[in-house]
Amino acid sequence: MLKHYASKNINKEIDFIYCAKSANEFVYRQEIDSIVDSTNFAKVTYFDSEKEGQINGEKVGKIAGGLKDKKIFMCGPKGMMDSLTTAFLAQKIHPRNIIFEDFSFK
């Protein structure tokens, strides 16, 4: 999605938060950095759970400068997405603004 926005020069403010268990698990980091560097509307934050603890709604809000009136796109393990969705709903984020893609390693 980030690559698409960059290739079409779609000027949407994007806060890309990439969460992984440890720093060595950030796949495609060089490509993501290159895409972000080529835009004036996207920024990336690498969230290392080993160092920073588990990601949660409050941490996402701080990284993104608040969540009001923003669309949230998530992709990740079901447990993480369920936990974040619950947190976002508690923060009064409208369910239509929470979009997720489910995947599993089964």
Image (cartoon, rainbow, N blue to C red):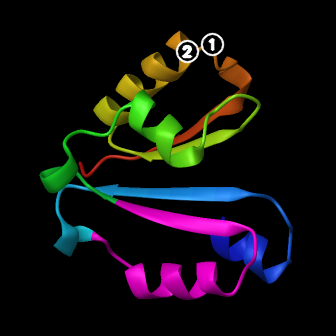
The vertical placement of 78 against 6, above or below, is above
Residue 36 found in image quarter: bottom right
Residue located at (59% from left, 67% from top): 43
Report helix, strand or loop for mark 2: helix
Q: Which mark is residue 48?
A: none
**Residue 14 placement, left or right of 9:** left
How packed mark 1 is, by other alpha carbons closer than 10 Å (few <14, some 14-19, many 20 or more), is few
The vertical placement of 24 against 82, above or below, is below
Q: Which residue is mark 1?
A: 92
Is there CB contact under 8 Å for labels 2 and 1?
A: yes
Where the N terminus falls, by quadrant? bottom right
The vertical placement of 11 against 17, above or below, is below
Residue located at (70% from left, 30% from top): 97
Q: Which is more toward the observer, 53 or 94?
A: 53
Q: Is residue 42 magenta?
A: yes
From the top left corner, tell me how far across and down residue 82 is, in percent: 39, 25
Residue type beneath disc 2: Leu
How packed mark 2 is, by other alpha carbons closer than 10 Å (few <14, some 14-19, many 20 or more), is some
Q: Which residue is mark 2?
A: 89
Q: CA distance from mark 2 to mark 1?
A: 5 Å
Q: Which is more toward the observer, 4 or 19?
A: 19
Residue type beneath disc 1: Lys
Please give the count of numbered marks on the rendered protein: 2
From the top left corner, tell me how far across and down residue 49 is, in percent: 21, 50
From the top left corner, tell me how far across and down residue 54 is, in percent: 23, 39
From the top left corner, tell me how far across and down residue 86 is, in percent: 44, 17
Residue located at (55% from left, 88% from top): 34
The vertical placement of 92 against 63, above or below, is above
Q: Is residue 86 magenta?
A: no
Residue lying at the far left of the rendered structure: 50
State the extent of the magenta-drawn residues as a range: 26-46
Report helix, strand or loop for mark 1: loop
